[in-house]
Every structure is written in structure tokens, then in C-alpha cells.
């Protein structure tokens, strides 16, 4: 496989790629065993028929770079069968220990998208399964966009699941450059996707379960990972998918037991309903401040941005909970729900050569992004933290060694409104600290931007003026580079950045000009 970055060779194919997190204890008794989830056969669960790799038509590709030049192959499969919906048994409590029962059943047929090493010998045993986000009205893979370079570097596989009805039938498509026409997969390419069918989002949880079973090889028919030694299957989901993942963890996982761990990214204070939900819609039957249940048998890592804490549409702060044996919460200072890596374009072509970091670090290259937001959007390098988070949850599943604990971002509340405590430069206090906030040349925040569609989620990047830079770095770039290198070393040793992103950013710091 090709090397993926100018900063050095591809990282070793192990989950120990996080530098300096801590040595594993000799003779550690593994609490979590790779591939230990209960199989469909033993649990009596429903399994899908699997067909593919799918051909015909032109197909609808997901947003993101083509990583085939790095030794990966993209395939598409259909899964179909009968899915159940779930209804709560009793009142849903904010503590998350929810009991549900399967009720109605309906036929479904949807797709999964697979990126995997072309050579099974290059596969490290981990499959990340992403619940594709449909907030823009079509399939969107934000965690693949954020972390594809790390997934490829370590030889893991990624699967995107069209779990919801909007994937198949379409939703309210945002007006943005490159957005597909309305109507979902069926309308976009009837030749390939005309036979797909989705009975509604009430059935999406079981669809996601059955996708996991297909990844494990428990489906009938084609085996997407035939010849690959799948050892760990980890579920991931961001934003709207993070809401649904919260409900899945609290209600469905105790019954299904398909996934070995979960990365929940940028969820809000509630969880998703057991039926349909429109973006921003109130959910009267779901309590505020939903926690992750405390009796899980698999680990959950939740990553939140500043926006998730303070935006009233998300309102995560009532859902804060202490870290525990199976739970970690990272709140990342200086980040927004979406940012310049996603909304500015680098995520669509970044193959890990360091060019993205050069653009993102330089405040002079800030802009309103592809959506044309009113002010330059956040460039807080959330993707670097998400790449580390994926590696951390993978290590946790594989070895039982949890991610490091992190302080919460400092907040205040008045009249039901949450605000972030900020320093004299407007930078959030507390939280997971990255070099972007610890050696700053701009203020990056998650407060509401203005402009069309989703700009309110993209935060801001506000360059420091000459006087502020001179006060922080009297000797100009030399002082800045020294401070930035020190912050990178700290972040990598803490396990919240990985070495390749750290090296790329150190190169980018040396290209910053003062004055």
C-alpha cells in the first residue's frame, strides 16, 4: 500500500498508534474481547440477505476522497430482509436504562458502502460502521470525512450504512454546490437503486443492527468481508446520527449485541425518537439531558464540540455525566459542530500529504466555506481529534485500555442559557486542549455563524491582530513555532492528536508569516 503522508511512513497496523497514552500493563486481563458480541444465531436476531458487489447504473458515491490510490477498494452491497420497529416499555428516564420491545415488522432493502484494503493481508481486523447522516437530505459520511486518513493509515475498514428513509427516498436537500437532486438513491439512479425500499425511520435501528450482522458475515448470500479476518466492529455516528446512536446504545444494543463499541460524535442533550424526526423538531417523549446508560458491556466514547454545548438546538450540557468504566466524554475547546475541514473543502480531497493543514492553520486563508457563511468559519482541527478518538475507541475495544480522561469545558448558565467561559482572547477555558487553542494565532469558537442553511453550526475563526500576536510571540514566528511544537508534543502524548497530524501541523506552523 502507498504511503499516505509527507510527514512520514504509514503508521504501523496496530491500535497502539496513539503515542504516549500510556504503557499497557504486562499480563493485563482483557475486560473486552475483540469480536465478543453475541452472534445473530445465538440471540435469535433477524439477519439480512446480502447481495453484491453491486453494479449497474452509475451509482451514487458518498462525499469524500477516493482512497483507491492508497491500496483500498470501494464496494457497494444491498441488504434486505424484514426489520422490526421498537416501542418503549414504560417511561423513558434520563439515566438511559431504557427497555423496549420489538413490535411491527416490515420489509426493507437498502445499501451499504464499503472501503476496505484491497489486500486482506493489509487489514488490521477493525471495521468502523458509520450511521450515515441524512440531515442535508441525502447520505453524508462526516466521520469518514474527518478520519479517513487514520482509518487508511492503520489498515482498518469503513462501512457507511444507509439506515434511514431519507437515504433511499430523499429528504429536504440543502441548497449548496454539489448537493444531489431530491429523491434519494432511488431517484438519483433508478437503474441501480430502483429496487431499494425503506419502511420509515421507526425501522432504522433494526436496519443498522442487520448491517452490523452483514459486516460480521452473518447475513445470507454475499459476504462483504469474505477472506478478511474481522475481529472488531465499532459503530460511529455524528450529529443527527449521534442522536440516533444514543438511542441505539441505550435501548437497542442490550438486545442486539452486534457492536463491540461506540463513538458518539456531536450529539445533543436529547436522543432520537423511535420513529421519524425532522431536524430541530422537539421530541416530547424523550427526556432532556439523556445520559448513556451505566450498565453497558461495551465502551462508549462521546466527543462534543463547543457548538454542541451552547447551541439551543443541540443543548448537550444537561446530558453531561462523569467518566466511568465504560464511558468517556471529550469536550474539545476551539471546535465547532462543522468546520473548515468539512465545509471548506479539504476533507473531499485530503490524502494525508499535509497540504490541508497548511491551509487550515493560516488565518489569512479563512473563508465562509462552500456554504458562503457570513464570517470565516471555524478551523479548529476537529478532524485531528476525531482521528485520535477512533484510535482510542479501537484500542479500548481491543485491549480494555480506556482513553484518557479530560476536563469539561468551563460553562456558566443563566436563565436556561449556557455560555462558555472564555479567556481574554475569546478562547474557551478547559476541555480537551489542542495546539490550535494552546498556541493560538486566531480565536476559533463554536458560536453561531450567520448565512445560508447550516452556517449556524460552523462557528468562527477570528485572526489575531498584530498587537495581540506581538504580545504573545515577541520574537515573531520563532516564538510561535517553539510554542506550537511544545503544544503538539503535549497533545500527541495526551492521545488527543496523532503523530501524523501533529507533524503536518508543525510543518504548517513554519509557513505562517507575521506582519
Image (cartoon, helix red, strand yellow):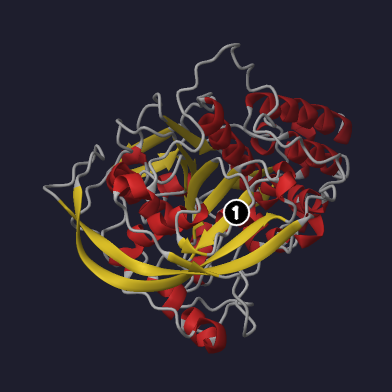
User: In screen coordinates, is 84 left or right of 192?
Assistant: left
- Residue 173 in view of the camera: yes
414, 264: nearer the viewer: 264
Say which residue appears at 37% left-offset and 44% top-offset: 316
**Rendered location of residue 206, percent (x, y):** 34, 59
**Rendered location of residue 80, percent (x, y):** 41, 70
What residue is shown with label 1? 158
Residue sitting farthest toward the top: 26
Say which residue appears at 81% left-offset and 33% top-offset: 480
User: In screen coordinates, is 476 left or right of 212?
Assistant: right
Q: Is residue 467 above or below residue 237?
A: above
**Rendered location of residue 444, percent (x, y):** 62, 46
User: In screen coordinates, is 4 left or right of 116?
Assistant: right
310, 244: nearer the viewer: 244
Say which residue appears at 57% left-offset and 59% top-offset: 224
User: In screen coordinates, is 114 left or right of 439?
Assistant: left
Q: Is residue 123 above or below residue 495?
A: below
Q: Is residue 57 above or below residue 456?
A: below
- Residue 474 in view of the camera: no
Q: Secondary structure at mark 1?
A: strand
Amino acid at each position: 500500500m502507498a504511503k499516505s503522508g509527507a510527514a512520514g511512513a504509514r503508521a504501523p497496523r496496530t491500535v497502539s498508534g496513539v503515542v504516549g497514552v500510556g504503557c499497557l500493563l504486562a499480563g493485563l486481563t482483557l475486560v473486552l474481547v475483540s469480536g465478543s458480541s453475541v452472534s445473530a444465531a445465538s440471540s435469535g436476531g433477524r439477519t439480512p440477505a446480502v447481495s453484491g458487489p453491486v453494479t449497474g447504473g452509475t451509482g451514487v458515491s458518498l462525499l469524500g476522497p477516493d482512497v483507491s490510490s492508497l491500496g483500498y477498494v470501494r464496494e457497494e452491497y444491498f441488504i434486505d430482509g424484514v426489520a422490526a420497529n421498537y416501542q418503549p416499555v414504560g417511561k423513558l428516564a434520563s439515566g438511559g436504562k431504557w427497555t423496549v420491545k420489538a413490535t411491527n415488522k416490515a420489509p426493507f432493502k437498502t445499501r451499504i458502502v464499503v472501503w476496505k484494503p484491497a489486500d486482506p493481508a493489509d487489514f488490521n481486523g477493525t471495521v468502523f460502521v458509520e450511521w450515515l447522516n441524512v440531515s442535508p437530505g441525502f447520505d453524508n459520511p462526516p466521520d469518514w470525512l474527518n478520519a479517513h486518513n487514520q482509518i487508511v493509515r492503520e489498515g482498518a475498514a469503513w462501512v457507511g450504512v444507509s439506515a434511514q428513509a431519507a437515504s433511499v427516498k430523499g429528504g429536504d436537500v440543502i441548497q449548496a454546490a454539489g448537493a444531489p437532486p431530491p429523491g434519494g438513491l432511488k431517484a438519483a439512479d433508478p437503474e441501480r437503486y430502483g429496487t431499494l425500499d425503506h419502511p420509515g425511520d421507526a425501522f432504522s435501528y433494526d436496519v443498522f443492527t442487520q448491517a452490523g450482522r452483514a459486516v460480521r458475515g452473518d447475513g445470507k448470500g454475499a459476504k462483504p468481508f469474505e477472506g478478511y479476518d474481522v475481529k472488531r466492529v465499532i459503530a460511529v455516528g455524528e450529529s443527527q446520527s449521534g442522536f440516533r446512536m444514543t438511542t441505539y446504545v441505550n435501548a437497542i444494543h442490550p438486545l442486539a449485541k452486534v457492536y463491540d463499541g461506540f463513538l458518539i460524535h456531536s450529539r445533543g442533550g436529547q436522543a432520537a425518537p423511535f420513529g421519524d424526526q425532522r431536524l430541530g423538531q422537539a421530541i416530547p417523549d424523550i427526556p432532556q439531558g439523556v445520559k448513556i446508560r451505566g450498565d453497558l458491556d461495551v465502551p462508549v466514547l462521546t466527543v462534543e464540540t463547543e457548538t454542541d454545548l451552547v447551541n439551543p438546538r443541540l443543548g448537550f450540557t444537561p446530558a453531561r455525566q462523569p467518566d466511568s468504566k465504560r464511558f468517556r466524554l471529550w469536550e474539545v475547546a476551539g471546535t465547532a459542530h462543522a468546520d473548515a475541514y468539512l465545509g471548506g473543502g479539504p476533507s473531499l480531497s485530503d490524502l494525508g500529504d499535509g497540504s490541508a493543514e497548511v491551509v487550515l492553520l493560516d488565518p489569512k486563508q479563512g473563508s465562509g466555506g462552500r456554504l458562503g457563511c457570513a464570517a470565516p468559519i471555524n478551523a479548529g482541527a476537529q478532524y485531528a481529534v476525531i482521528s485520535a478518538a477512533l484510535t482510542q475507541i479501537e484500542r479500548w475495544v481491543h485491549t480494555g485500555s480506556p482513553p484518557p480522561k479530560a476536563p469539561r469545558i468551563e460553562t456558566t448558565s443563566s436563565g436556561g442559557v449556557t455560555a462558555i467561559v472564555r479567556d481574554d482572547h475569546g478562547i474557551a477555558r478547559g476541555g480537551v486542549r489542542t495546539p490550535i487553542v494552546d498556541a493560538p494565532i486566531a480565536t476559533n469558537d463554536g458560536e453561531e455563524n450567520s448565512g445560508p442553511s447550516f452556517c449556524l453550526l460552523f462557528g468562527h475563526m477570528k485572526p489575531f491582530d498584530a498587537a495581540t500576536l506581538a504580545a504573545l510571540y515577541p520574537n515573531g514566528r520563532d516564538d510561535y513555532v517553539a510554542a506550537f511544537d511544545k503544544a503538539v508534543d503535549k497533545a500527541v502524548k495526551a492521545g488527543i492528536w496523532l503523530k501524523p497530524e501533529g507533524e503536518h501541523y508543525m510543518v504548517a506552523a513554519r509557513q505562517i508569516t507575521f506582519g
